[in-house]
Image (cartoon, rainbow, N blue to C red):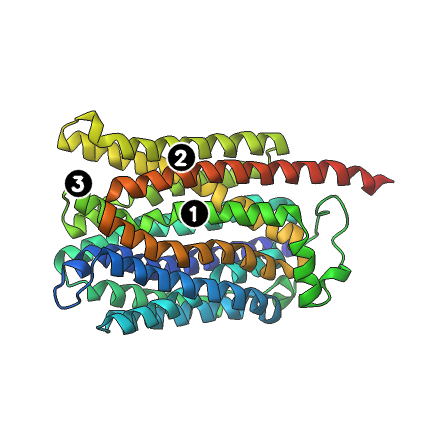
Amino acid sequence: MGAGRARLRWQVTTVGCLYFGYAGLVLCRTALPIAAPAMIDDPALGLDKASFGALLGWGAGGALAGKLLFGVAADALGGRWLFLLAMASTAVATVAFGASSGHVLFMLFNFAAQMTKAAGWPAMAKTIGAWFETGRLGRIWGIISTSSRASSVLSSLLLGGVLTVLPWRWLFFVAGATTLGVVVVCFFALKDSPAAVGLGLPSKQAADGHDTSPRVWAGTLRSTLVFFARSDRVLLICIAIVALTLQMEFLSFLPLYMKEVHGLEAGVAGIASSAFPAGSFLSLLAGGAVYDRLGGRQRVRVLGTLLGASVLCVGVLLGLSELQLSPAATLGTAIFATFVFGFSVSPAYYIPMSVFSIEFGRSRSGVLIGLIDACGYGAMMIILPLTGALLEAKGWNTLLSVMVGLSVLSVVFLTAFLVAERRAKAVRVPTRHV
């Protein structure tokens, strides 16, 4: 009984450290989108929407590099040290960004901040895999994922409020200093695995219907990559994550959208953009609690229905100008639509990929989750500069039309992945008893 209470206490501590640590990473990431309207209005910087899109593209490039590098590093170093490194490095790069001037330094420090932030998710995958049983992964990832969305809400409100009274540079100073404070706490409280505190490893359930012992394909990085490349499920989730990541990245443009389309001041626009992560938070809170209890068919139906709703939400934003509503009603409808959009997309983006990476990737879960995320950030690196240029040349309706297409793609490919997962487990589970 004593050991059980000790394990529970350390598991709660672990989740708390990961939760608030990742919140710090999101706080650093949120500073740039919230500051964007004020930075574009600052004549000393010479930024416009096209150059802002290029700046985001450099950040996506950093995230891509980080996913490829730190996915491997997570399997080699373990989750704790990589997580501490990610937080500290991201905080320092964020403060340096705020102290900089000129496009080259902005791109350099945004690249660095997003590269080191990218280590957070693989590090958490290794830590969660070490501390929790397979049958609880959906629940735990749902809780952890709410950190991203809750911190996005609070970050938007906090940094938007700061922007109403202080210059835009202070957003980066506040975000970086806060995250460094979290690093200090996690350094003492976060442990790499139960063995580090004298506890036994958690019992593991069978993954994919067979035992979880080490596999031949996990022996070398090359054999691991070949194995993943031959998996239809890995291919499907990678394509789905490309579309979902680009949908989620709409949040980076929301403050600009609220300012330019609805005429809000820069700080108020940042606060209004918190509707997206607020919807995400609520859906992840519910989704994580029920994901492990859903059967394969139910997961297909629930997540497919939610993603279908995301298509309708973008359609509402696209058609707002045709509704001839009052300005207040138009703004309220836009905020509600972005809230529902965040609610619809987030469970599909966070939970299936994270659970699949641990179950299917096993001892190479860091590599797998890094590769899947790298696909999304690789697409962002290409698309975001084009998005800024598209906005500058064609306006918001064109961008929203593209978002409708991405929403449809995410429905198709995530549904295909979930169906493939269900079929694979249905075929393999009976073989355990042969």
Which one is in front, 44 or 76? 44
What number is the disc on residue 134?
A: none
Give the Cα separation between the discs numbered 3 and 1: 28 Å
Q: Nearer the viewer, mark 3 or mark 1?
A: 3
Residue 390: x and y in percent read 28, 50
**Mark closest to the chain's N terminus, 3 or 1:** 1
The tag on residue 146 is 1
Instruction: Tell whether 423 sits left or right of 185.
Output: right
Q: Residue furthest right?
A: 434
Locate residue 17 relative to residue 74 in the image: left or right: left
Please state if 215 lies on the left or on the right of 161 as rendered: right
Is disc 1 placed on a helix, strand or loop? helix
Q: Secondary structure at mark 2?
A: helix
Q: Residues within 10 Å of mark 2 (few under 14, many from 20)?
A: many
Q: Amino acid at mark 1?
A: Thr
Amino acid at pointer 3: His
Q: Amino acid at mark 2?
A: Ser
Q: Which residue is mark 3?
A: 262
290 shown above or below 270: above
Please name the residue shown 38% across and 37% down the image: 404
Q: Residue at x 40, y 72 (%)?
A: 89
Query: Which residue is located at x 61 percent, y 63 percent?
Result: 193
Around disc 3, counting alpha carbons within 10 Å, would you say few (fewer than 14), some (14 to 19), or many (20 or more)? some
